């Protein structure tokens, strides 16, 4: 066929989709446990929402957005991330007081595709709004950590930093800019161009790492309120026994962060895509998109990368494969009985030979096989070495007792 999925997008089917399904189910379980109800926002939003929310001069906005003009002449953008849309939805809802939302869905960024870096990728995440204290940050970080541990992300690490706020960051940025200005000739072209524009972003440059070894770190320039907050978050994480390390150079690619910034790193993945997730506090975001003050904290995790690093082995998808000599009508009938009793069942609709049906049954890794010989005859149920003949009407109960 001449059509391929667009560059940087994927068709995901079985067996890989079994892992996706398990990861997404676990996500719902963990989000529920922490009291985050589902929130769903549009896949496209007004372009300006991301320009103002994520930041005009971030790479996400300047290089990676899928932006187009719709038939009504409006500039809209496929969401490159979930936070700006969720905060907009929260503000529009007019809900007062602390508010939680969990999301799961595709995001779009025009990036150079590679493993774990896709143009359409899937994020799960949470936003916790109208909350100020460090316990909120710790709770959010814990949720991501427990979930990523449950889905067996290999070599999981939490990396933490504080980005300060509007009172202490400008002083730090000026100090950093002065430090970088003195070393302009040692920086790569891209970093050199960022010294005046956004020196924080230089800290993220892998090429310039040697020049940055002695660079001033934000955590040494925090104002008293930010230092207290940062100490509070660390104390709570220790209390919750969540291992973390600090990295004064951790700056996130989005402009809205204040105070806490963190990443979940899968140390077993290649460095270019080993951040399986990240997040932080964004106390000024709601105001920057025209709303009231609503400090918040959240994270998003990249499911494509989680699947790459997870050592989950998917469970069997099927409880029973039904095989019939009088295929298909009797298998159809027997399958229906079992399905209505809550079992996961499949059979061959195409009238293939019994031998061919057994082949499919073993390939499908169904946990049990039911051999049906005619509507009234006893059927034979098989689980491993165990075999029994019984009336069709008793089969569902017999199988359920053994499989559940
Ligand atoms: P982010 O760091 O841009 O943060 O993205 C979070 C995660 O999404 C990354 O760590 C990565 O796993 C995944 N990701 C990002 N881009 C791609 C891509 N092109 N292909 C595959 N996976 C990707 C945010 O999006 C913020 N909204 C997180 C947040 C929520 N902060 C506060 N609340």
Image: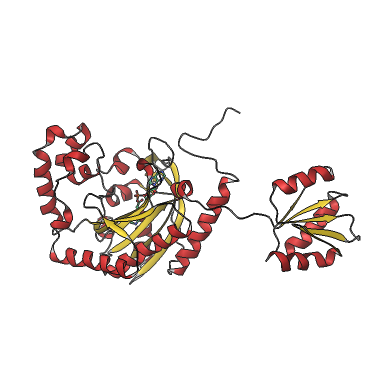
Q: Residue 257 appears at what percent x and percent y?
A: 26, 55
Left or right of 213? Residue 65 is: right
Q: Residue 87 appears at what percent x and percent y?
A: 34, 59
Is residue 349 in sight in this rendering? no
Instruction: In the rendered view, tell whether residue 320 sits above or below residue 109.
Output: below
Residue, far bottom: 97
What's the residue at 41%, 41% (across, down)? 117
What's the residue at 30%, 63% (across, down)? 296
Q: Residue 365 appears at what percent x and percent y?
A: 68, 51
Left or right of 321? Residue 155 is: left
Instruction: In the rendered view, tell whether residue 59 sits above or below residue 400.
Output: above
Q: How many marks?
A: 0
Locate residue 230: give its quadrant: bottom left
Locate residue 397: give its quadrant: bottom right
Who is closer to the viewer here, 345 or 120? 345
Who is closer to the viewer here, 341 or 197? 341
Residue, far front: 385
Q: Quadrant of the N terminus?
A: top right
Instruction: In the rendered view, tell whether residue 93 sits above or below residue 207.
Output: below
């Amino acid at each position: 066929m001449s059509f391929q999925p667009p560059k940087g997008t994927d068709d995901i089917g079985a067996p890989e989709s079994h892992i996706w399904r398990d990861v997404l189910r676990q996500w719902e379980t963990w989000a529920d446990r922490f009291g985050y109800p589902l929130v769903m926002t549009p896949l496209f939003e007004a372009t300006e929402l991301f320009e103002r929310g994520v930041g005009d001069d971030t790479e996400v906005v300047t290089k990676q957005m899928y932006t187009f003009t719709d038939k009504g002449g409006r500039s809209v953008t496929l969401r490159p991330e979930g936070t700006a849309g969720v905060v907009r939805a929260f503000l529009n809802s007019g809900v007062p007081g602390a508010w939680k939302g969990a999301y799961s869905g595709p995001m779009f960024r025009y990036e150079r595709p590679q493993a774990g870096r896709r143009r359409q990728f899937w994020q799960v995440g949470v936003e916790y709004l109208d909350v100020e204290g460090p316990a909120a940050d710790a709770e959010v970080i814990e949720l991501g950590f427990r979930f990523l541990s449950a889905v067996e992300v290999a070599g999981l690490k939490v990396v933490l930093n504080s980005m300060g706020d509007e009172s202490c960051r400008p002083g730090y940025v000026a100090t950093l800019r002065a430090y970088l200005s003195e070393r302009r000739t040692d920086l790569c072209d891209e970093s050199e161009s960022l010294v005046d524009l956004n020196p924080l972003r230089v800290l993220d440059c892998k090429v310039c790492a040697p020049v940055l070894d002695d660079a001033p770190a934000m955590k040494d320039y925090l104002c008293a309120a930010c230092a207290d907050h940062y100490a509070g978050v660390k104390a709570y994480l220790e209390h919750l026994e969540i291992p973390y390390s600090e990295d004064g150079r951790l700056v996130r690619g989005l402009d809205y962060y204040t105070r806490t910034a963190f990443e979940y790193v899968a140390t077993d993945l290649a460095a270019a895509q080993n951040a399986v997730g990240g997040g932080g506090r964004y106390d000024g975001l709601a105001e920057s998109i025209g709303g009231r003050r609503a400090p918040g904290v959240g994270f998003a995790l990249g499911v494509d990368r989680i699947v790459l690093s997870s050592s989950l082995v998917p469970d069997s998808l099927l409880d029973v494969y039904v095989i019939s000599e009088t295929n298909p009508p009797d298998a159809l009938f027997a399958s229906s009985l079992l399905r209505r009793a809550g079992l996961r069942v499949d059979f061959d609709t195409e009238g293939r030979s019994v031998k061919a049906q057994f082949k499919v049954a073993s390939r499908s890794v169904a946990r049990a096989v039911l051999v049906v010989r005619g509507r009234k005859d006893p059927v034979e149920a098989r689980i491993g070495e165990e075999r029994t003949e019984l009336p069709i009407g008793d089969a569902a109960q017999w199988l359920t007792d053994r499989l559940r």
